Amino acid sequence: MSNNDKPPPRFKELYKQQPASRDVRHRRLVHEAQLRRLQREQVFMDKRLRYRLPQESETESEYEFTPLDTKHIINGLKSTRHDERVEALKNLITKLEQPSEELRRFVLEGSCMELLTKFFSATDADEKLHSLWCLTNIAANEGRLAEKVLPAAPYLLSLVTSDNVELQNQAAWALGNLAAEGEKMRETLHANGVLKPLVDLLGSTSDEAILQTACFAVSNMARKPNSYFDELFALKLPQLAAKQLTVFKEHQHCVTELAWVFAYLAASSSEHQVDEILATGAIVTLLQSAVETVKADAPGASLIPVIRTLGNIAAGTDAQTSSLVGMNGFVGLLVRCIESTSSRAVEKEALWALSCVTASSKADVDAVVDAGVVPDLVRIIEKQNFDIKKEAAFSLLNIAIIGGRAADLPNERLIAEFVEFIKSQDEELVRMGVQYVAIAFEQLPDSRGPELLRGVAGGIDALENLIATTNDDDTRSLLSVLIDQYFGEDAMSED
């Protein structure tokens, strides 16, 4: 099964078909699910960058770097005195975090890179280290600046395999920032041969700091798009990362960085590759670490890569999703993250994972419903912003459709919220609102669905207005059927 054949993450079975335009709507929902995955991956694949500053530095976001400052740094870098050269390097490191226009010109058009690369052959390790810090911070900036560091990639690669731990760490850090810049940069780095040394470093180091940096660099290299993704599996990256996870499982920062590696791997893996990840046992280790973290404290940012990993695996086959649901603590973790209001980012990630779980099988839907997640989904629908509401709505729709449990939902509270979806300007929200109304009409006994809609001020009007204004033929057709069947003259006379 290729990456392109991987089932859509939200709706593997999708919505039940309605009487009108069934095939068209089915194709459309598949397409929408694929688009949502792509949109999410664009957010997920945003640059992960790391700046490094001297511990004693105090950055000034509005610092005005002038030509006089440039001249001062150039003189310091050319000085015959060791302390003045190091001081100039430290000053440059600090200012490169948020470079002014003058400093950008110094890097892009001036002698900055020439002066820094001269330190590569320096005999003083301190000067060499600080020059690497400068490159790291330049690489953390946008394209044109980062590209200035690319010619140094062979030198950085040589340091990755060196015996000097500080230089090794800093070189991997700079390469990680470069890899975050984009596909072209990653392909160039791959052509320079950085992948195997970075993976080997990740798998062999016993140093916490180097492990975190190696994970950072490798996870950025694993970001799609790239042409070498399968090579990561040929290099046994999942197995090496799983081994290190066992060794460093008591070190939270290491666990977090290793989780990012698995998050990026699982985001783009084929069915076979996800099975390979599961076979390492790393997912169980990550899950238990997350469960312990939540027990000790409220869900925080360190959980994000773990929840993303779990969500990406849940977006796989039904068998893979069910294997997660069967893991001790998985469902409870999602519920805990969703019910907690301490971190909006964690809540959103957990909702994504839950929507993938509820798109799997009735047994998986029953597991999360029985764990008590519905009240929190309803709370989110009622009180949160539309972006979070949308995430919760996917799970509620899946619970109704795949779980066949529409009657178990507090529909008297939900109906008004989904009518608001229909009134919104967001096409996806509109379709979700219409779908919920259709489900309520079909699944709730004793004409309970139409009765609930009548109880919503402007509810029927919202459907009729949408028929008149929508450009979506499928939505118009479905609404027409619903109106005629439940609110037409014949239906009214039956009442």
Image (cartoon, helix red, strand yellow):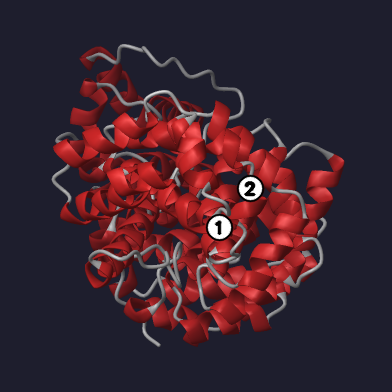
Tag 1, which secondary structure?
A: helix
Q: Residue at image x 59%, y 36%?
A: 412
Label 2 sits on residue: 409
Query: Mark 1 or 2 closer to N-term?
Result: 1
Specify whether 150 is left or right of 405. left
Judge by depth and name the residue closer to the eye, 443 or 61.
443
Residue 440 locus on image (x, y percent): 49, 50
Label 1 sits on residue: 400
Classify 287 as above or below 60. below
Classify 385 as above or below 141. above
Amino acid type of the residue tagged 2 in the rendering: Leu
Judge by depth and name the residue closer to the eye, 258 or 51.
258
Specify whether 449 is left or right of 407. left
Residue 89 locus on image (x, y percent): 43, 32
Residue 227 locus on image (x, y percent): 29, 76
Are the two marked residues, 1 and 2, in contact with CB atoms closer than 8 angstroms? yes
Tag 2, which secondary structure?
A: loop
Q: Quadrant of residue 244?
A: bottom right
Q: Residue at image x 23%, y 61%?
A: 184
Query: What is the spatial separation of the Cα atoms under label 1 and label 2, in whole angstroms?
Result: 8 Å
> How many other residues sit within 10 Å of disc 2, few (<14), some (14-19) or many (≥20)?
some
Residue 174 locus on image (x, y percent): 43, 51
Judge by depth and name the residue closer to the eye, 37 or 209.
37
Judge by depth and name the residue closer to the eye, 146 or 6.
6
Q: Residue at image x 47%, y 57%?
A: 442
Amino acid type of the residue tagged 1 in the rendering: Ala
Specify whether 226 is left or right of 237. left
Quadrant placement of the C terminus: top left
